[in-house]
Image (spheres, coloured by chain):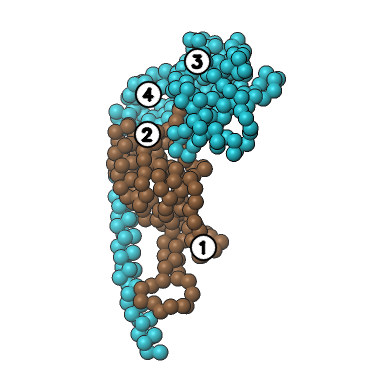
Chain colours: A cyan, B brown
Amino acid sequence: MSTPTLIKTTARDGSGSQASRRERAAGLVPVIIYGHGQDNVQCKVDGHDLGLAFATSDQVFNLEIAGKKESCLVKEVQYDTFGQRILHVDFSRIDLSEQVAVEVVLEFRGDPAGVSAGGTRIVHHPKLSVNCRADSIPDVVVIDVSGLEIGDSLHAGEIELPEGVSLDEGQLAPGEQVFAVAAPRVEVEETTEDAEGAEGEEATDEKTDEAKPDGDSEGKKKDSGS
Amino acid sequence: MKNMPKRFKHRKVQKGTIRGNATRGHTVEFGEWGLQSLQAGYLTSRVLEAGRVAANRAAPGSRITIRVFPHKPVTSIPAETRMGKGKGEPEYWVASIKPGTVIFEIGGADESHAKLAMNRVAHKLPVKCRLVQRRVR
């Protein structure tokens, strides 16, 4: 693992939603640092620097808090509705030699044989919960799925993990499907039925639409008659 | 199957207003690509069905997920009706959409097919949309 990226923090003037909004408007991101039996520290980070730091696959960062460097693990990142702006980050203090529970991205390589035969690739879990040392969190776990036929699946317990990394069975059972190649669905009949159904509905709607003015005219006649 | 609730408490509901951005249902959860609304609006059950059919035709064999449901009845009064006589009858059902809501998701398709399918769907919808990918980091 390379040296963790350094993120400089500054103390926050106030807490709460109003203060947070003011900081966000100034291009800063409110963050909280907790863990290891120490007091929580609320501070702010430059949004641009944070964005650059999070563009990498790192999960552990060095945070400079009041002139002191601490190793921290990203616990939670809150984004805005459109997923473009970071609103808030939770950091947890860690010791680089301790075991941590993190989520690692899975990269499925190769085209499964079943997909070329008409099957559908289904990714049930794009990430895997693992336990490992904080200084050896893998960036990505690569899985070769080229040998999977239709109906085959890959379970969490079958994934080969790097040395020192183990599956977090509390989060994901070893028997849980992670990747599967499903049999092709009988789309032709369904689609035609749907199409006919949709057309049929439209046709009936059109009929009802056409029928409505008649009903109205009847009502009008009644009105005029009265 | 008609895309409307099986049962409902009230036949007619008030219009209400759509305020603010979506605070939930704004991330891709079930597929790999999604279609996110950039505007507020109402999506009728017919529009959602048209989108589903379009997506299935553009990317056959993929898994399409519709993340919204038309819970809201919309009433209308017939043309050339005199004033009064109360509120109209329920005509169709709509899903109320806030900006940021993920409307459709697609999984099990390669990138080109997924983009094509979502593009076809976007053309069916009365709101501006954008394609979003599932966030894995």
> Residue at the spot x=36%, y=82% of the render?
A220
In the rendered image, residue B59, in percent from the top left (x then y), is placed at: 31, 39
Query: On the picture, is B48 further left or further right than A85?
Result: left
Q: Nearer the viewer, mark 3 or mark 2?
A: 3
Real-space Cα separation, disc 2 to disc 1, in angstroms: 38 Å
Which amino acid does the dot numbered 4 rest on?
A: Leu
Residue B108's tag is: 2
Is disc 1 surrounded by few (<14), some (14 to 19) or many (20+) residues within 10 Å?
few
Real-space Cα separation, disc 4 to disc 2, in angstroms: 15 Å
**Contact? badges 3 and 2 (CB < 8 Å):** no
In the rendered image, residue A83, in percent from the top left (x then y), is placed at: 45, 35
Which chain hosts label 3?
A
Q: Quickly name the residue at label 3.
A: A5
Which amino acid does the dot numbered 1 rest on?
A: Val
The one of B75 and A82 positioned closer to us in this rendering: A82
Q: Nearer the viewer, mark 4 or mark 3?
A: 3
Placement of A223 over or under B94, stated as above or below? below
Real-space Cα separation, disc 1 to disc 3, in angstroms: 54 Å
> Residue at the spot x=48%, y=53% of the render?
B18
